[in-house]
Image (cartoon, rainbow, N blue to C red):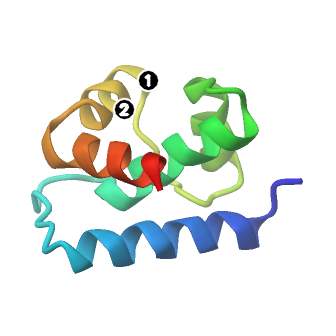
Amino acid sequence: MLTEDKIIGIFCLVDDLLKGIGHQEDCRRKVSDSEVITTSIVSALYFGGHLDNARHMMRMTKMIPQMLDKSRYCRESNGGESNAACVGISMV
């Protein structure tokens, strides 16, 4: 069962890993790379890979209140280091 504690744990792990590899984020972004990757992981683990369902849940529960719309989320999740970090985490 998915709980806020599990989501927070996933977020902390992802955020610590990104900081550990020296990841730098663009200051203009509304949603951090850690939040994008966390949403992708939650989608894979609890929603059968349905990103839209995970995005909706993260926004409705106020876990990520400024969640990106579907198009922007896909662009963010497919760009640069964020994507590389997500692939690395999924292999662990």
Q: Which residue is drawn at 89% across and 53% down?
A: 1
Q: Quick check: 66 left or right of 77?
A: right
Dot 2: element: helix
Residue 51 image offset from top left, x and y in percent: 56, 28
Most extreme residue toward the front, as rendered? 92
Q: Residue at x 81, y 62 (%)?
A: 3
Q: Are marks 2 and 1 in contact (CB under 8 Å)?
A: yes
Q: In this view, does 55 lie above or below 7?
A: above
Specify whether 5 is left or right of 16.
right
Label 1: which residue? Answer: 70
Image coordinates of residue 31 in percent, x first then y, are 33, 53
- Measured in 3D between alpha carbons, the distance from the residue under mark 2 to the one under mark 1, in whole angstroms, is 5 Å
Near mark 1 (Cα within 10 A), the count class, few <14, some 14-19 or many ≥20, is: few
Can you name the residue that lies furthest to the right here? 1
Q: Residue 53 carries which label?
A: none
Q: Identify which residue, 86 or 73, lies in the foreground.
A: 86
Please state the total of marks drawn on the protein image. Answer: 2
Q: Nearer the viewer, residue 66 or 70?
A: 70
- Please tell me in which quadrant of the rendered image residue 77 appears: top left
Residue type, numbered disc 1: Lys
Residue at numbered disc 2: 73
On the image, the x and y values in percent for residue 57 come to 69, 42
Specify whether 52 is left or right of 13. right
Q: Can residue 66 be seen in this view?
A: no
Q: Residues within 10 Å of mark 2 (few under 14, many from 20)?
A: some
Residue at image x 18%, y 72%? 21
Q: Residue at x 43, y 56 (%)?
A: 35
Residue flagged by tag 2: what amino acid is it?
Tyr
Q: Is residue 87 above or below residue 6?
A: above
Residue 63 lies, in percent from the top left, at: 60, 60
